[in-house]
């Protein structure tokens, strides 16, 4: 797109690939993220959506169905293989969700402190508009996982009926904090996995035999520790194979740049302005603004053994220093474009985690390059792939805090967007005009190519597909007999 008058130009990114083990970290710069406002309409009536329809999630109706009456459901992922294929196992589609008890006396915003991994299954040939997901209950038995709270991850079908569940083991230390929803002793976080078995018969799907292994804790050199910042993030493992490095298994995860909170000095490369850009900010102004507190990164690790029980950190593949503090649930999606593999890194982020001087919506952000480690080009020049309808001209709000009256009532309609094969994007419903969610959103579709993404409004009804539509694209076992 042509540059917008009054705004800086985005940074130049070559998309060039580097050795995954090298220390090149791509920067999502302030100049890049400034394009979100450059592409937003400054003249909408207050509370309308100011973003382009190409990057706006269609509006979820207020009378959405709840997929389960006993548990709230949020972050969700499918049973996959190492190439992000979604696996139908013996005729069943299987999904994993963070769940929390709806009847335990705490509210939806307290879900994080009470999170467990649950699972659902549904026949592969079910009608996604009519047939409900069957709830299978908690995946792990009580008090068996590494932490006392289970946060997001990913699940891979391995040989035979083995599954590896990669997850975040979050440990809260104080019961008051769990019940009140924050403010107490900061939790510990580790990335863990559980190897177990999946069983399927005509009645459905069960799991057993999970053996848990702690895999990684932040090192304080590349990835920030709790001692360096009680508000650190270290979570959301997603593992995959890279055709450019056969035999290796990689993991991306959410991290923060190591170092004591507040010590970070914003750098010219974090700002990313082109030389002589009249709309560039000065480094001193940015450093003095408090932007140094926002230090998100997307981490990379490589497995050291075939059992995937030993891992080594590699330097982060992306940082958002002085731009944003959270790049959550990262995933790598490889797509062939013009005979060449292009690597799309998708990650979710919030409006309230942006640094001073930056503004963007809750939603999913994308970056494209020639390899797992590359000089990633933000999609649409800005990084924003799909956001909830938001008036970006009004100040940022926090989904679990106060919400300004004038703002679009759908600014937090959905979160935790996860890109599936075919550009299908699933997410969970958070808040639709004050109606709280805790259930999966209608799936939407984005088309992406050459670093440009666009919501497909011909998909479903005006762009909204079935609720909780996570179709499988590869069958293993059973030939769909059950
Ligand atoms: C995203 C997220 C994840 C985390 C989970 C905790 O919605 O913040 O990063 O694993 O929720 O509930």
Image (cartoon, rainbow, N blue to C red):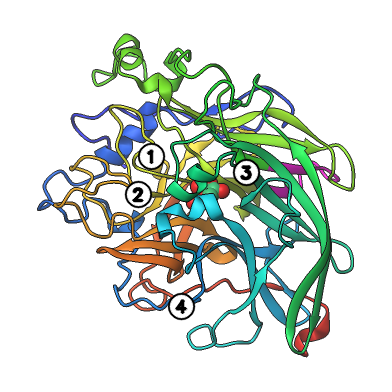
Q: Earlier in the sequence, mark 3 or mark 4?
A: 3
Q: Relative to residue 368, is residue 432 drawn left or right?
A: left
Contact (Cβ within 8 Å) of mark 4 with mark 1: no
- Dot 1 beta carbon under 8 Å from ligand 1: no
Residue 335 image offset from top left, x and y in percent: 62, 54
Q: Is mark 3 within 8 Å of ligand 1?
A: yes
Residue 241 drawn in magenta: yes
Q: Which mark is residue 382?
A: 1
| Residue 400, numbered label | 2
Magenta-highlighted residues: 238-251
Find disc 3 in the rendering and name its residue.
170
Q: Circle 4 sits on which residue? A: 466
- 31 or 153, nearer to the observer: 153
Return the disc, 1 or 3, that comes first in the chain's sequence.
3
Within-10-Å neighbours for mark 4: few <14, some 14–19, many 20+: some
Mark 2 or 1 closer to N-term? 1
- Which comes before the other along the chain, label 2 or label 4? 2
Residue lying at 27% horizontally and 35% vertically, measured from the top left: 3
> Quick check: can you spot residue 48?
yes
Residue 193 coordinates in the image, percent (x, y): 76, 49
């Amino acid at each position: 797109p042509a540059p917008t008058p009054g705004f800086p130009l985005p940074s130049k990114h070559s998309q060039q690939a580097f050795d995954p083990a090298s220390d090149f970290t791509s920067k999502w710069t302030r100049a890049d993220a400034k394009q979100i406002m450059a592409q937003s309409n400054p003249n909408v009536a207050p509370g309308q959506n100011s973003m382009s329809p190409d990057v706006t999630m269609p509006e979820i109706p207020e009378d959405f169905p709840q997929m389960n009456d006993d548990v709230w459901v949020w972050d969700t992922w499918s049973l996959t293989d190492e190439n992000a294929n979604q696996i139908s196992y013996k005729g069943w589609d299987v999904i994993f969700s963070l769940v929390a008890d709806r009847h335990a006396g705490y509210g939806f915003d307290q879900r994080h402190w009470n999170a467990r991994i649950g699972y659902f299954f549904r026949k592969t040939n079910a009608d996604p508009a009519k047939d409900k997901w069957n709830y299978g209950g908690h995946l792990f038995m009580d008090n068996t996982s590494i932490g006392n709270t289970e946060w997001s991850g990913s699940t891979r079908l391995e040989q035979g009926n083995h599954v590896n569940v990669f997850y975040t083991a979050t440990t809260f230390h104080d019961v008051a904090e769990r019940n009140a929803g924050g403010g107490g002793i900061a939790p510990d976080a580790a990335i863990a996995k559980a190897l177990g078995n999946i069983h399927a018969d005509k009645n459905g799907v069960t799991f057993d035999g999970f053996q848990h292994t702690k895999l990684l804790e932040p090192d304080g050199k590349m990835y920030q520790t709790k001692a360096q910042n009680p508000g650190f993030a270290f979570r959301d493992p997603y593992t995959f194979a890279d055709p450019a490095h056969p035999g290796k298994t990689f993991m991306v995860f959410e991290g923060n740049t190591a170092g004591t909170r507040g010590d970070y000095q914003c750098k010219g490369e974090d700002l990313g302005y082109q030389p002589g850009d009249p709309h560039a900010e000065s480094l001193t102004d940015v450093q003095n603004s408090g932007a140094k507190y926002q230090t998100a990164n997307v981490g990379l690790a490589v497995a050291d053994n075939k059992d995937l029980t030993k891992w080594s950190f590699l330097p982060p593949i992306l940082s958002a220093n002085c731009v944003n503090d959270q790049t959550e649930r990262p995933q790598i999606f490889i797509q062939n474009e013009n005979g060449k593999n292009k690597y799309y890194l998708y990650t979710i982020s919030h409006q309230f985690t942006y640094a001073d001087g930056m503004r963007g919506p809750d939603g999913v952000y994308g970056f494209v390059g020639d390899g797992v480690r590359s000089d990633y080009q933000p999609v649409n020049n800005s990084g924003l792939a799909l956001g909830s309808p938001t008036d970006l001209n009004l100040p940022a709000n926090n989904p679990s805090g106060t919400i300004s009256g004038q703002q679009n009532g759908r600014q937090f309609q959905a979160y935790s967007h996860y890109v599936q094969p075919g550009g299908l994007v699933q997410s969970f419903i958070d808040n639709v005009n004050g109606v709280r969610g805790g259930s999966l959103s209608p799936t939407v579709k984005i088309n992406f190519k050459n670093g440009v993404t666009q919501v497909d409004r011909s998909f479903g009804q005006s762009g909204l597909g079935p609720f909780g539509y996570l179709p499988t694209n590869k069958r293993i076992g059973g030939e769909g007999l059950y």
